[in-house]
Amino acid sequence: MNALTSFGPLLGRILIASIFVLSGISKITGFEGTVGYIASKGLPFASLGAIAAIIVELGGGIMLIIGWKARWAAVAMLFFTVAAAFIFHNFWGAAADQAQNQMIHFMKNISMAGGLLFVIIHGSGALSLGKTRA
């Protein structure tokens, strides 16, 4: 096994998960702001939504990095990411001065979903806690 096939999936998992881990941490440190933002979109139970987002982003991101139950984490993160794209980055309904920015964020989420789909299909790779030993 060469270095690319050994370390590539690990590096990919770290790169995909880093935005989720950092976002989860920022939701903890700015919890009230997160709750307010969720509530501003008209969603019920904003506090519970913020807690769920922290669990998915921080918990799922860490699981993805270490490769433990990475496929399950990626499934949860994929659904979360696509839902967030449609709920929080609806560029089609944004004001003209914010439409392009919201479209970029929407497409970022869709692109991240693509990376998560890759993990779901191909697994976490050789350097992971989820790797079974012969």
Image (cartoon, helix red, strand yellow):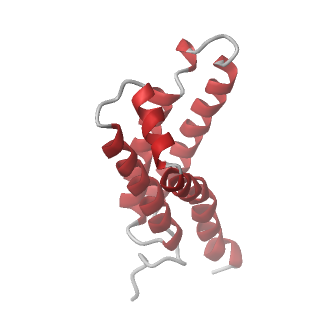
* Quadrant where the N terminus is found in the figure: bottom right
Residue drawn at the location 42% of the way across and 62% of the way down? 59
Residue 79, position in %: x, y? 39, 42
- Residue extending farthest to the front is 32
Task: Give the percent coordinates (x, y) of residue 124.
Answer: 49, 67
Compared with 101, 75 (above or below) is: below
Classify the position of the C terminus by image quarter: bottom left
Nearer to me, 44 or 100: 44
Q: Which residue does the image show at 70% across and 78% down from the upper left?
A: 3
* Residue sitting at x 53%, y 49%: 30
Where 105 falls versus 117 (above or below)? above
At 49% from the left edge and 61% from the top edge, which residue is drawn? 61
Is 38 situated left or right of 115 in this image? left
18 horizontally vs 33: left or right: right
Image height check: is 25 above or below 68? Answer: above
Give the number of callouts.
Answer: 0
Which residue in the rendered view is the most extreme toward the bottom?
Answer: 134
Res. 110 image quadrant: top right
Q: Position of residue 7 (x, y in %)?
A: 65, 74
